[in-house]
Image: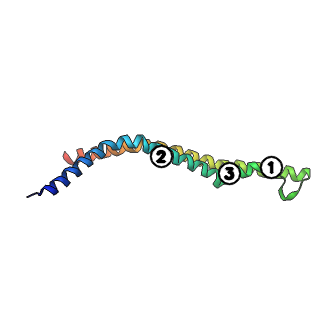
């Protein structure tokens, strides 16, 4: 025999489970999407700091090793310009990866539902 307290717990768990199950898609495409987008944007900003592109750009016209001669300045500019290009490629790779992760996030929920219902139909048939 089910005691009233167990029945209350069961009803509460069932009601909460249904409510959360119905709220999950709304959260996924509202707050979850907002948090994921802000995390990806912060990640891209962090990649700029990680690769040091901002520091290389800031020092583009500063002579290396204090050599202010024309040849030293040209070599310094050339080396730094090449390093900026190479490091910017690293940032661009991460930007592409972040965009792919964003679209993967958008597709994850429908693909999960498709997999769940496909498996459910496979089990029932």
List the residue tagged with mark 1. 78
Is residue 121 found left or right of 74 in the rendered image?
Answer: left
Up the image or down, 3 lies above or below 108; here it is below
Q: Nearer the viewer, mark 3 or mark 2?
A: 2
User: Do tag 3 and tag 2 residues touch (Cβ < 8 Å)?
Assistant: no
The C terminus appears in which quarter of the rendering?
top left
Is residue 14 found left or right of 53 in the rendered image?
Answer: left
* Res. 110 in view: no
Q: Residues within 10 Å of mark 1 (few under 14, many from 20)?
A: some
List the residue tagged with mark 3. 87
Which of marks 3 and 1 precedes in the sequence?
1
Q: Quadrant of residue 96?
A: top right
Rounded to the nearest whole Å, what is the CA distance between mark 3 and mark 2?
27 Å
Is residue 35 found left or right of 77 in the rendered image?
Answer: left
Q: Which mark is residue 35?
A: 2
Residue at 28% x, 44% y is 19
Residue at 76% x, 48% y is 81
Q: Nearer the viewer, mark 1 or mark 2?
A: 2
In the foreground, 5 or 38: 5
Rounded to the nearest whole Å, what is the CA distance between mark 1 and mark 2?
40 Å
Q: Residues within 10 Å of mark 3 (few under 14, many from 20)?
A: some
The secondary structure type at the circle numbered 3 is helix
Residue 21 placement (x, y as % from top left): 30, 45
């Amino acid at each position: 025999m089910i005691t009233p307290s167990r029945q209350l717990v069961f009803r509460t768990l069932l009601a909460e489970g249904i409510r959360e199950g119905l709220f999950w898609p709304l959260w996924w495409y509202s707050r979850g999407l907002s948090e994921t987008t802000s995390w990806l944007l912060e990640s891209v900003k962090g990649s700029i700091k990680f690769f040091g592109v901002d520091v290389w750009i800031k020092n583009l016209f500063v002579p290396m090793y204090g050599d202010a001669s024309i040849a030293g300045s040209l070599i310094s500019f050339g080396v730094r310009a090449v390093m900026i290009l190479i490091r910017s490629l690293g940032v661009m790779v991460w930007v592409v990866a972040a965009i792919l992760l964003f679209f993967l996030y958008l597709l994850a929920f429908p693909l999960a539902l498709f997999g769940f219902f496909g498996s459910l139909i496979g089990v029932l048939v």
